[in-house]
Image: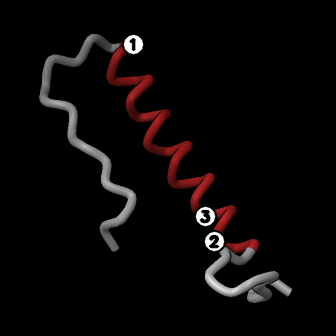
Amino acid sequence: MQNFWYAESKWTIIEVVQHVIDTERVFSYRALYFARNDQTALPGFDQDVL
């Protein structure tokens, strides 16, 4: 079931869940960065890098 694509070039359920987890991790890090008033350089985020 988790490897099922409903159409060509669409994400599977597993890929959607992993994307949500990855994005939540990035936003959580950035929220802590701003809350702590961290002065180090904030790294970029490129979702297309594998």
Q: In this view, does 49 lie to the left or right of 12?
A: left
Amino acid type, residue under disc 2 in the picture: Glu
Amino acid type, residue under disc 1 in the picture: Ala
Q: In this view, does 37 lie to the left or right of 48?
A: left
Amino acid type, residue under disc 3 in the picture: Gln
- How much space separates mark 1 and mark 2, taking CA atoms? 30 Å
Instruction: Give the foreground label among 1 and 2.
Output: 2
Q: Do the residues labelled 2 and 3 touch (CB within 8 Å)?
A: yes
Q: Are marks 1 and 3 in contact (CB under 8 Å)?
A: no
Secondary element at image label 3: helix
Q: Name the residue under label 1.
A: 35
Q: Name the residue under label 2.
A: 15
Q: Residue furthest left?
A: 40
Q: Quadrant of the N terminus?
A: bottom right
Residue 18 tag number: 3
- How much space separates mark 2 and mark 3, taking CA atoms? 5 Å
**Residue depicted at 41% across the width and 23% down the height:** 32
Instruction: Give the foreground label among 1 and 3.
Output: 3
